[in-house]
Image: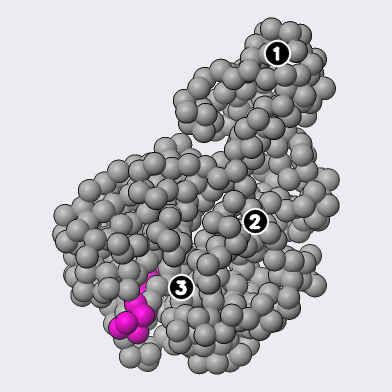
Amino acid sequence: MAVSLVVGTPKGAAVLQSKDGKTWSEDFVLRGWPVTASVRDDKGRTYAAVNSPNFGVALFASDNLKDWKQLESAPRYRPEDRGNPEHHRLVAKFDFEGKLKDGGRFVDQIWTLHNARGALYAGVSEAGLFVSKDRGESWEPIDGFNEMPGRAEWQPGFGGLGAHTILTDAKNPNRMWAGVSAAGFFRTDDGGKNWTRKDKDVHGFGGNCVHHVAHDPDDANVLFRQEHFGVYRSDDGGDNWRVLEDGLPVTDMSDGHRCSFGFAMAMDRKAKAVFAVPLDGDAQRFPRDGQLAVYRNADGKRWEPLTKGLPGNCFAGVLRGAMSADQQSGVYFATTSGALYASGNLGESWNEIATGLPRVMSVDAYVQ
Amino acid sequence: MSVRVQLPPLLRGLMQGERWLEAEGNSIGAMLADLGKRNPSLALHIFDEQGAIRHNIAFIHGDEIVRAKQAAAHPLKPGDEIVMTTALAGG
């Protein structure tokens, strides 16, 4: 079984490939372009999102992970779309010529790409969703989400107002979820026309700073959620949530709430195992005492730490997009200090398969 | 009226490594519009959602540095050569 990893960094994408899960080849593509997300479609084409602070957002596509061609279209707001004042305030330091003072809305990053039912979806900041039904040749805004009442009051997370998580239901084409930092977690049941916030009983203030959500599209209503303030589980598609932190390290957060903290979350659908990388609170944002650890929840109840092969002197973080499961017992994640780890046995043991990478923003695993 | 524009290194990769491109226009704005029409993948990187030149792009025209905000109306003559670059940022 051959596995390919596309690892997004601010300086390009590392592409690692292995036929046996032990030895890996490494290439570095899209050099100079910050790569923020990737996805593979049903026909085997891989798409990578780039965002240059100078040259904006675009998508590249490749059929072999070596030769990349930029698509001529990318998610873009309409000229008349109005932006969120708080997001503008956060990104204003890059606004050298006062562009944002005009109040426009701009796509400044593609946070996630998602493939479902023959369509590609993009979640972007300033927060919004776009869909392409022609392999990225054209993109349409999902207006039901992008023009949702109340978006002017959404508060951005530290990284901006970003739609970073998209989930779909394999059995219900009208149902879809999207997570926005720090506005909350939203669900549509009518194919994207109307969206409802699904944050009941999840700790937050004002909005909810959802960091990432994992699920199995074939069992879509069971959701595992890494929130700024803790880890939660829902069994009813997000209508209700309960804390799922038994076994996780918890600490006092900035507002005094005691809970677990982290960003990344991934799921192996066959094993029904969920993986998280807890960081020691929102003040430190690195593994407790420097011991890098992946936590696995294999029974839907309790988390267990997995550290075999992981360093005890890691004072870096793991970002929300930087962990992926290949659905064949392979789990992969990378740190903000550029170390990439692989496990072929659901996290029982880990190997460092790349080091010296720039800050890793995304890791996506594809099985040939 | 034809002018030549030198692309910044990152964008040359979209043009098979070409350093210089020719375009028509009697101003930087007109020249970029023509360049984008011929090369839609370049247009994404030059113009933002509102059709304005991305604010971090700058141009060198002879001895003059032209920032994005002034670039659209900046006049060009036939045979002029323009260097497209980015405003310096960082330390």
SS type, badge 1: strand
Q: Which residue is mark 1?
A: B2
Q: Which residue is mark 3?
A: A261
Q: Which region shows up in magenta?
A: A268-282
Identify residue type, mark 1: Ser
Q: Residue at x 71, y 70 (%)?
A: A145
Camera-nearest label, 3 or 1 = 1
- Report if residue A295 is visible in the image: yes
Q: Position of residue A91 (x, y in %)?
A: 67, 49
Q: Chain of mark 1?
A: B
Residue B50 percent across, percent down from the top left: 78, 43
* A245 or A236, nearer to the observer: A236
The secondary structure type at the circle numbered 2 is loop
Residue picked out by circle 2? A139
Q: Viewer-proximal residue, A351 or A283?
A: A351
Looking at this view, is A248 or A47 the one in front? A47
Residue B75 image-quadrant placement = top right
Seen at 81% across and 56% down, the residue is A82
How far, Cα to Cα, is label 3 from label 2? 35 Å
Q: Residues within 10 Å of mark 2 (few under 14, many from 20)?
A: many
Q: Amino acid at mark 3?
A: Phe
Residue B39 picture location, percent across and down: 62, 32
Real-space Cα separation, disc 1 to disc 2, in angstroms? 33 Å
Which residue is depicted at the point 35% across and 49% down?
A: A64
* A310 shown above or below A296: above
Alpha-carbon neighbours of circle 1 within 10 Å: few (<14), some, or many (≥20)?
some
Query: Picture quarter containing residue A3?
Result: bottom left
Amino acid type of the residue that numbered disc 2 sits on in the rendered structure: Trp
Name the subunit of mark 3: A
| Residue at (51, 51) in percent of width and height | A49
Chain under label 2? A
